[in-house]
Image (cartoon, grey):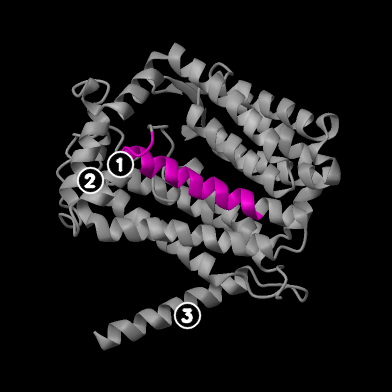
Amino acid sequence: MIFDFWYFVFFMSRVKQTINNLIKPRASQHEPDWSLIITTAVIVVFGLVMLSSASLVVAYKEYNDSYYFFKHQLLGLFAGIIAFLFFARVDYHKWKKYAFGFLIFSIVMLLLVFIPGLGKIVRGSRSWIDIFGQSLQPSEFVKLSFLLYLAAWLESRGKQINDFHQGIGPLMIILGVIAGLMLLQPDLGTLFIIIITSFVVYFVSGGNLKYIIIISLISIIGLTALVLKNEHQLNRFKCYRNPDFSPQNYCYQIKQSLIAVGSGGIFGRGLGNSRQKFLYIPELENDFIFSIIAEETGLIVSGLLVLLFIFLFYRGISIAKKAPDDFGKNLAIGIVAWIVFQAILNIGGIIKLLPMTGVPLPFVSSGGSAMMASLAAMGILVNISKQTRLR
C-alpha cells in the first residue's frame, strides 16, 4: 500500500511536469492555476469511469459492444485534450482580433444543420451534422465561439454598454439571430445556457440590471409561449410539476431517474451495481447519467461531484477578479457560468428541482462535441490564469 501511494505521487508529479512543459508560461507569465486543472481532470476521469459503468448494457444492446460509448468518449477526450493544450498555450488576447470571425463562425455552424445530406435529426431535434461518419453538434462549439465574440464586443463598448443604440440594442439583435437559428432546430436547453451566460457577462461588464430584468421577463414570456405550443416541452413541464401525470409515458424517464437516485441512498449500491441501467432509463449515457452516479455511488460521492463543480466556479471567479483586462474577465466569467450553470440545469432536472432541459452534464455525459468544446474553454481559462495579477 505504501509503495502504491508513493508510485501514485510520483506518477502525478510526472503528469504535472509534462503538462507544465506543454503549456509552459512565457517570461511575462506565471504558473497556471493548478487547482483548476486538477479539479477538471478529476471530473473528467470520474466521468469516464461512470460512463463506462452506466452505458454497458445499452451499448451492448444497440451496438453489440459494451464499451461503445466509452470508446467514443475517449476519442472526444483525445481531441479535447489537444484543444485544451492549444488554447492553454496561445495567448488569449490573440482571439480578440478575430471576434467578428467568431460571430460569423457561430452563425455558419448553426446553419449547417439545415443543409440536406449534412444535417440530421436526432430525437426530434435537427442539432447534428454528419461528417465522414462522425456526428458533431455545432451548438456545443457555438457556446465558446459566441462567448469569444461577446467578451471582445462588450469590452469594445466601454461606457456605451448601457446605451440603447450602441450597447443593449445591438446585443439583443445579435442574440436574436442566434436564438432564432436555435429555435428552428429546436434546442431550447443550449439556447437557455447561451442567453444566461450572455446576461451574466453583460452584467459583469457593467450592464444595467434593469435591462437584464426587462429582457429576462420578455424572454420568459416568449419561452413560455413556445412551451405551450410544443407538446413535448409542455409535457416535460407537467412532469416537473407532477411526475405521476403520465408515469408510463411522458414522465417515465424522470420517474425512473428519481427511483435510481433514491435507491442509491447515502453510500450507493456500489460501482457497476446499478439496476436502473438495465434499460429502465432512456438516454442514461447522456442527459441522465447523474441518475446512475447517484445510484451506484450514493449521496456522499455524488455530492462531492457537485462540490467539485462549485469549486470550479470559485476558481473561475478568482481568475476573473485578477484578470489583466476586461476581455479576460468577461471570458473567465462566461466560461465558468456556462459550465456550472449547465451542470445545475442537468443535475437539478434529474432530482426534480428544475424542469428537464435536455442538456448534458459537462465533462461526464457522453458526447465528443461537448467534451471538445468544454476542454477548449478550460484551456482558455487556464491561459488567463497564467496572466492574472499576483496581487
Q: Which disc number belongs to residue 261?
A: 2
Q: Which mark is residue 336?
A: none
- Residue at left offset 64%, top offset 39%: 199
The three-letter code of the residue at mark 1 reads Ile
Part of the protein shown in magenta? 332-354
| Mark 1, residue position | 351
Looking at the picture, which amino acid does disc 3 mark? Ser
Residue 333: tell me if it is visible: yes
Location of residue 348 with respect to 377 vertically, above or below: above
> From mark 3 to mark 2, how far is it between C-alphas?
36 Å
- Badge 3 or badge 1: first in the primary sequence: 3
The label nearer to you, 3 versus 2, is 2
Residue 297 is situated, as x and y percent measured from the top left of the image, at: 23, 56
| Whether label 1 touches label 2, CB < 8 Å | yes
Principal SS element in the magenta part? helix
Quadrant the C terminus occupies: bottom right
Q: In front here: 138 or 357?
A: 357
Q: Position of residue 322 (x, y in %)?
A: 69, 66
Q: Which mark is residue 13?
A: 3
User: Could you tell me which secondary element the residue under label 3 belongs to?
Assistant: helix
Say if the magenta span includes residue 341. Answer: yes
Q: Which sits earlier in the primary sequence, circle 3 or circle 2? A: 3
> Relative to residue 370, is residue 156 drawn left or right?
right
Depth check, mark 3 against mark 1: the one in front is 1
- Could you tell me which secondary element the residue under label 1 belongs to? loop
In primary-sequence order, the first of circles 1 and 2 is: 2
Residue 207: image quadrant is top right
- Does the segment drawn in magenta span residue 360? no
Q: Residue shown at 47%/47% (left/top)? A: 76
